[in-house]
Image (cartoon, rainbow, N blue to C red):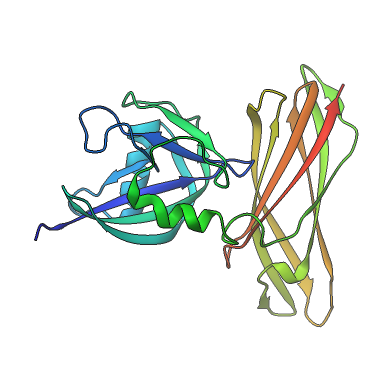
Amino acid sequence: MSAVVRVAAAVILRADGAVLLAQRPPGKPYAGYWEFPGGKLEPGETPAHALARELVEELGIGVVRAAPWLVQEFVYPHAHVELNFFRVFAFEGEPVSHDGQAFAWQDPRAIDVAPLLPANTRVLAALKTNLGYSEIPLTLRTEPASREGRHFLLPISVTLPASALTFVPEGKVKRATADVSIGAMDDSGRVSDVVRQEAAFTIPLGVETTTLDFTTKLYTRKGNQRIVVNLRDRLSGKMGTAKADVRIE
């Protein structure tokens, strides 16, 4: 039996919850099939190092924050592969095809590209379950935007239950940290002005706090905008999302 080929694959998460799929180019096995970006580990590489290298080489983006997720083995007629899937929560740059392959942002609940590579079935199923952006209930509020030069500054407030995060005692307080991504989507569905921040919460020990508030501001453009906020508890990996439609003028 042939040796197992180890692969790092990226589930890249956009601010609106979409994931990035890439189409395998001509000349490769399963050409024309859609898959999650990534590639084979080189000798001496860890999956995390391979992930970072492949995303730079394939899409020209740098990994800022990612976490191991699922590992799946699959036997193809041409190879036995071990897929190490990572969820990529934050990245630098905009994806650009360096290998000539097509790519598309897809709603994991309604993927409309085909055919899909068979080895991706488990991770696609997981994306449709409560492993997605439904574990933390969020409430999103916006205030009127103020104009600053060619852009507008939109105040944003996010409320969530304290019980949704994992707090760690530190002396007389307990702390929790979450990763927050905020983006604006225009009428054409184009996402821009994405902001990625760390949200840190501190609660005194013995004090029962029912809700937490996170406030920030987003530079955006004039017109109809859908504001999308994604929040991920850094310790548990639980995630939540909230959306609001606003008119900027």
Asked whether 25 or 204 is in front, the reply is 25
The quarter of the picture where residue 194 lies is: top right
Q: Position of residue 177 (x, y in %)?
A: 65, 62
The residue nearer to you, when weighing 37 against 28, is 28
Q: Quadrant of the C terminus?
A: top right
Residue furthest top as drawn:
150
Q: Is 36 drawn above or below residue 93 in the view shown?
A: below
Residue at the spot 84% in from the left edge and 32% down from the top edge: 246
- The answer to whether residue 214 is left or right of residue 12 is right
- Percent across and percent down for residue 107 are 57, 41
Q: Relative to 113, does residue 164 appear above or below in the rendering?
A: below
Q: Is residue 77 left or right of residue 244?
A: left
Place of residue 176 in the rendered image (x, y in percent of width and height, measured from the top left): 67, 66
155 horizontally vs 174: left or right: right
At 80% across and 20% down in the image, what residue appears? 222
Tell me the residue at 43%/53% (across/down): 86
| Residue sitting at the far right | 144
Residue at image x 46%, y 47%? Answer: 11
